[in-house]
Image (cartoon, helix red, strand yellow):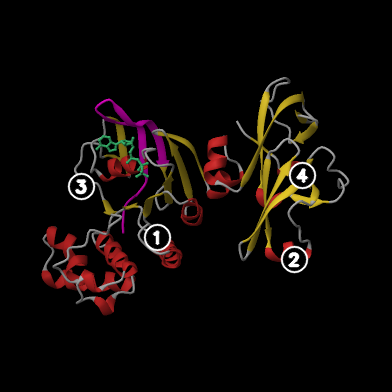
Amino acid sequence: MTGNGAIELIAVSKYYGSTIAVKSIDLKIPAGAYCCLIGPSGCGKTTTLRMIAGHEVISEGDLLIGQRNVTELPPVKRGTAMMFQNYALFPHMTCAENVAFGLRMQGVSPAERAERATEMLARVHMEKFADRKPDQLSGGQQQRIALARALITQPEVLLLDEPLSALDPFLRARMRDELRRLQQDLGITFVHVTHAQDEALALSDMVVVMEDGVIRQQGSPEEIFNRPRSRFIANFMGGQNIFKGRVTRADATATIIERGPDQFVLPVHGDAKTGEDLEFTIRTDLIGLAQEIPAGAEQCQIPVEITTVEYLGLWVRIVATTIDGKDITLMKTESEFRRAPVRRKEKFIAYWEPEHAHVLA
Ligand SMILES: Nc1ncnc2c1ncn2[C@@H]1O[C@H](COP(=O)(O)OP(=O)(O)OP(=O)(O)O)[C@@H](O)[C@H]1O
């Protein structure tokens, strides 16, 4: 697969009458990257994907694929292929015919079509099913055929609209692995729309979080998860507790905030100003419970009472409530929990390392 699958959106907007579905977004996806677009329902992720595919007209702005301005080009001229949520296989065609369909449209000879379809079926481990019709396949198998059909024309970019959402959780995890492996083997750009945080984190080189038609944050899965830019991102991606307080000290050596009777020391934050409110996050797995305030944790601790203990198998989820009624969630591995079990109504000090606090914008 030759050429360049880099994608660039420059001030791209989409209007449906008076509805603004996508508001002047700028986005650069490097060639060969796995990019997931994620966000709550109605945030504009599907519209963005469909504009890249050419299935939706771009109202304003420019779209470059491999440095070529493709804004006005029809889907077949963009070097992209799309895989739909419902797979959209032709029910009257065999798997091999479905897979070869794109080549037939390009006028490729029957012999070459058959050869390339066989090769592509093997790539998705479906060579044994070449003569079956789609209704004789499981959901996961149909998905593999849809993938092979999308990839046979050797696109530079594969666009996937919620490709795993119709599968059960077990199959979803397996197909997730296969998608990632296939993308790495082929080295082409994948842009994948999902509403599942775990999927975006597991698959992506680059996660793009959208809300209300704009991009709120983009970065590696580690960046998005560990350094959410805002309360929205922290809540949406999950795994974080959010605290709010008033800045009492902000200088080159420390940022300190006050929340009721408690003072918290945070990593030095350039933008913090004394007297302003500031929010920070602590990951649910980075909070400890102790009977007494551990040495060095005087300004990163808070007294709590355990209100919920939920056994989840590998993890135990604990909710601990502060005196003023704020719930703090803690995740302990099952073995950690077994070493130090806690029960409802027990009182503890919840504490964390100061460097684990992450200040929100
Ligand atoms: N054909 C259309 N006509 C009018 N409005 C539309 C049309 N398609 C989408 N919209 C609106 O544009 C906005 C973005 O829609 P889009 O489908 O891109 O969201 P999404 O993030 O993919 O949501 P979901 O996760 O629910 O699929 C929504 O407010 C939606 O109602």
Label 2 sits on a secondary structure element that is: helix
Q: Residue at x 88, y 46 (%)?
A: 295
Of the two numbered discs 1 and 2 on the same chain, state the one appearing first in sequence: 1
Mark 1 to mark 4 CA distance (whole Å): 46 Å
Mark 1 to mark 2 CA distance (whole Å): 40 Å
- Residue 70 position within the rendered picture, expressed as x and y whole percent measured from the top left: 25, 40
Of the two numbered discs 1 and 4 on the same chain, state the one appearing first in sequence: 1
Q: Residue at x 53, y 36 (%)?
A: 232
Label 1 sits on a secondary structure element that is: helix
Q: Which mark is residue 156?
A: none
Question: Which residue is disc 4 drawn over?
Answer: 304
- Residue 254 position within the rendered picture, expressed as x and y whole percent measured from the top left: 78, 31
Question: Which residue is disc 2 drawn over?
Answer: 338
Asked if residue 352 can be seen in this view, the reply is no
Amino acid bearing label 1? Gln
Label 3 sits on a secondary structure element that is: helix
